[in-house]
Amino acid sequence: MDAIPVGFVMARTDFGDFGRAEPVAILDTIGVDPDYSHHGVGHALLSQLFVNLEGLRVERVETIVARENFGLLGFLYDIGFEPSPRLAFVKRVA
C-alpha cells in the first residue's frame, strides 16, 4: 500500500505421500501495520492466501488464538473462521 509493505501473513502446509500437499494449512502469523489497520489489508492478505492454498488443493486452514484476544477473534470470525470442535490442552513439566 502506498508502495510500502504494510502487512504480512505466514502459513504452512506439510507435504504428504508422493509430494502432495496435505489438505490442511496452518495459519501461523498475520500482521498489519497499526497505521493501516481497518483498511482491508488483513482481508486482502488472507483472501490471496486462500486462493493460493486452493491452488494447492488445501481444503481447510487452522490457527490458534488466545481466547482473550478479542480483536483477532473478531477478525477471524469476520473472514469466515469458526471454532474447532477440538480443545487444546497444555501441561508444563519444568
Image (cartoon, rainbow, N blue to C red):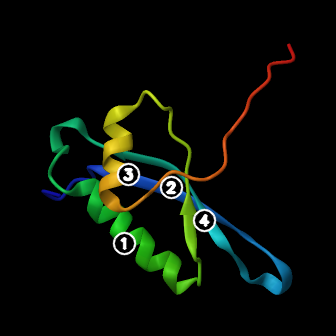
On residue 76, the disc is 3
Check the image and report above or below for 3 versus 83. below
> Mark 1 sits on what residue?
48
Is 2 left or right of 61, judged from the image as shown?
Answer: left
Q: Nearer the viewer, residue 38 or 2?
A: 38
Secondary element at tag 1: helix
Around disc 1, counting alpha carbons within 10 Å, would you say few (fewer than 14), some (14 to 19), or many (20 or more)?
Answer: few
> Mark 4 sits on what residue?
25
Around disc 3, counting alpha carbons within 10 Å, would you say few (fewer than 14), some (14 to 19), or many (20 or more)?
Answer: some
Secondary element at tag 4: strand
Is 43 left or right of 40, judged from the image as shown?
Answer: right
Quarter of the picture holding the N terminus: bottom left
Q: Amino acid at mark 2?
A: Met
On residue 10, the disc is 2
Is 91 left or right of 52, judged from the image as shown?
Answer: right
Image quadrant of residue 32?
top left
Around disc 4, counting alpha carbons within 10 Å, would you say few (fewer than 14), some (14 to 19), or many (20 or more)?
Answer: some
